[in-house]
Amino acid sequence: MTVEEKVKEQLESRFADLKGTVKVQRARRLWVEVKPENFTAVFEYAIKDLDFPILCTITGIDEGANFALIYHLAQKTGAVLNLKIKFDKARAIKTISTYFPAADIYEREVVDLFGIKIDGLKPGLRYPLPDNWPEGQYPMRKDWKIESLKDYDAKFENESLSIPIGPKTLIKEPTDFGFIPGSRHEEHEVVIPVGPQHPALKEPESFSVALRGERIMGVNIRIGYNHRGIEKACESQSYIQDVYLVERICGICSHTHSTCFVQGVEELAGLQVPKRGLYIRTLIAELERVHSHLLWLGVAGHEIGFDTLLMYTWRDRESVMDLLTLITGNRVNYGINTIGGVRRDLDATQIPEISKVVDKLEEQTKYYIQVAMEEVTLIQRLSGVGKLSPQDVVRLGTLGPTARASGLDRDTRRDDPYAAYGDLSFKVITDNHNDVYGRTIVRLGELMESYSMIRQLVKNLPDGPIAVKAPRRIPEGEVFSRYEAPRGEDVHYIKSNGSTNPERVKVRAPTLANIQSVSKMLEDRYLADLPIVIAAIDPCFSCTDRAIQIQDYTQGTERVMSWEDLKQFSLDWYRERGVDFTRLSKVKWGKD
Amino acid sequence: MVNALFIILIFPGFLFLSVISLFAEYFDRKLYARLQNRVGPPWFQPLADFIKLLGKEEVVPEEADRSMFNLAPVFAMASTIAAFFYIPMWGTKAIYSFSGDLIVILYLLMIPTLTFFLGGWYSRSLYSTIGAVRSITQLFAYEIPLFISLLAPTILAGTWSLSELANFYTTHPWYWLFNLIGFGVSLVALLGKLERVPFDIPEAETEIVAGSFTEYSGRLLAYFRMAIDIETVVGASLIAAVFLPFALNLNPVLGFLIYLLKIFFIIGLLSLFRTVFARMRIDQMINFCWTYVAPIAFLQVLINLILKGIGL
């Protein structure tokens, strides 16, 4: 008996009124609708007796007459139990943060975006809307219109963001380690702002850090500065447009989001993607992981003042970026995915190039592993910093390399295989250091695994078509798609109403799950550890894209610049300003 | 009077020292870049940076103490230049010398660190305050090893005057080899004094933005940066004078070239450290200085006392 059938049987035998309602959608996917009054009992049974210890996310849906919440629970076998409750708009739902402290942020999200009432939610900062967002405006509700914000325009201009920072505004009443700004006033303590703009951060987040001397007494995290309303925007566009929109959620793991979305839609439409398409998709995914991990290594080096590592790894990372450009035509937002497969085939001349780059990178990575093992100041700065016990990982819902560095053997690629991962042989790298050093080791190990996967993919690349034709209208249904992004598991929930546009798209990027653990990791640490601990969960950074179409406004003509043109353009630009990079541009890195 | 002004303002005073300091900054940045596989700046970059900063708007925070905020960079620059006159460069004789000038140099070189503290403290910004406190905390870690290691060679020479020290080591040509341990210690301490990686804790960018200098801009920041550059050259000259006192008293041109070679060798070593190490934490730095660096400095003193005792 398969896992999902066993879960179905257990659920149906335990709760009489669920008989016949547990739906097995496919292998490892279960859907069940529960009455709100029975929810707590079923939820508790699922996490305790059925062993679903991971809460992927909570999806809120506005179904017109009522709200619905879906709790996506996962377990080690890769099975996902989607518990759905429907309830009246006025009804309050009990919080589940008693079971999962990390659920806090998902609940705040539905509170902010839908106005769903949650009972027992601890007081705290809102997420994800701005602090001066007007009361009673819930943008994800179906009947909400942007015009309703008109009256508030003047108010936005006059009111500054009100996060009180600094000793003057603090009043006594510390809660726990995480604190509410303005609630803390201890003797000899200062609260310093790290963010929203700060050299340690590559994107806006705000950490208010209460310090006594160098010691961190409390951290408060405010995120949501970059919320662009992509989920709402997805509802107003067609599926194929959404592929390109979700790709732009993140500059580093763009392929992550587009693949996660696309494979969900393919499942809804019942499309069989050709093997060759899946292999190419997986190849890009692994190349993306390589560039993301190399980027992380550099950022980690920079955070601890080891800029040499940054310069070396980012130099090597360029070769992966070039390879991605070669294969997909783009450096960051590859645009290779489409519903039903991929848009570009791999041509035979590209394969030797891939092997060449992978060989070189493997050699370099071995060197970085050696550096990580031997360099004294690096080890001193990383080991023992940002400790997170395996119990805390489970409790706080931490994912990806951060979880694996605390000895948790979880990887969606193996547990819930998608794309071509079922055909590949690879190891899931884990480590028992539980600290930033462990996270470094895990990421370096994963790089080596990625190289081996890329070799397997290129070697066993099947022949045949790369895509099948997808319908414009996607049949009614809902789907839950998972993808192991470089920084942890990325999940998408897609609901279709049978039209050309999705009814609801919900995205939970891995950083949202991981950020919960940061304040735990900083407990009893020094200020100097703050940047590296934040960086160690690899929060998503944005990259810039290149402009390839140049519009000449004086003559009204358009031309497309090739890679060589761009290179020449940049060389000329610098030469005019007195620096000549011509010689350097011909130098090849590495040993040749 | 004219002669003294020439010495202070032109050679080897402010102008000469500025030129050589800017060049030292270029050398450091270029070497650092090449070691990191980068191209690095063109030769005029430090000068261009300096001029650009001079032209920028100066912003003094409202909360800051204006006079302290404005004076700190000037004091930093003045004290480092003053220290330079007591260091023999290519002869055995410094421009000014008296018995005990080594101690004066050490105190003059402590003033920049104090100005970093005062400038940061009176900026009244949180980052600056933390940077200022770190500067002064760090001072207690490296200053003692620096003093001890620099005073160790004087035990053999029996003088606290740098010029007499140079004389002694010129008449006893290979004695400087006894002081190599002290040389290493003083390099490590100089890293701390100049607040460079791995001891750039007071201005750790990713933690406290720019530490003491966070609120500084324009002309004042330019002075501070110039003071640090000058301090680098003066620090290197001091170490060269104490630990590498050979090939002095040659003809002036050759002597000058050898002097440059010595200080750029020392600055090159500092760049190398910057390349291969990560920044330490303040607690690690203090532990390191007191458990390893200070005892090793004392070991040098012990060796020299024994050498002196057996009658060298």
Image (cartoon, grey):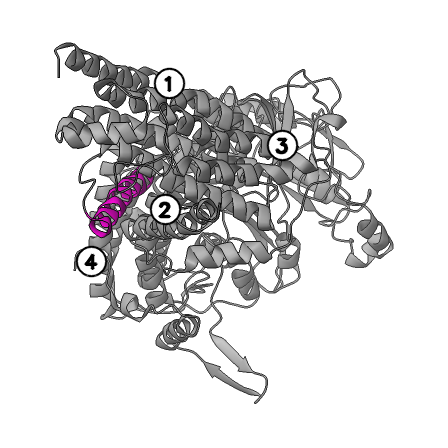
Mark 1, residue position? B287
Q: Residue at x 48, y 29 (%)?
A: A528
Check disc 1 and give the amino acid type: Asn
Q: Do labels 3 and 2 touch, CB within 8 Å?
A: no
Residue A160 is labelled as: none
Callouts 4 and 1 close, C-beta under 8 Å: no
Secondary-structure class at tag 3: helix
Q: Earlier in the sequence, mark 1 or mark 3?
A: 3
Numbered-mark total: 4
Please give the chain letter of the residue carrying mark 3.
B
Q: x, y (%) of residue A166?
A: 70, 30
Residue A310 circle label:
2
In whole angstroms, how far apart are the C-alphas of marks 4 and 3?
Answer: 57 Å
Q: Is residue B282 magenta?
A: no
List the residue tagged with mark 3: B126
Say which chain tag 4 marks: A
Task: Check contact, mark 2 vs mark 1: CB within 8 A.
Answer: no
The residue indicated by pointer 4 is A459
Same-subunit check for callouts 3 and 2: no
> Do badges 1 and 3 share one subunit?
yes
The quarter in which the N terminus of chain A is drawn is top left
Q: Hey, which quadrant is residue B239 in on the image?
A: top left
Disc 4 crowd rating (10 Å Cα; few below 14, some 14-19, many 20+) is: few
Residue lying farthest to the bottom in this orientation: A555
Q: Nearer the viewer, mark 3 or mark 2?
A: 3
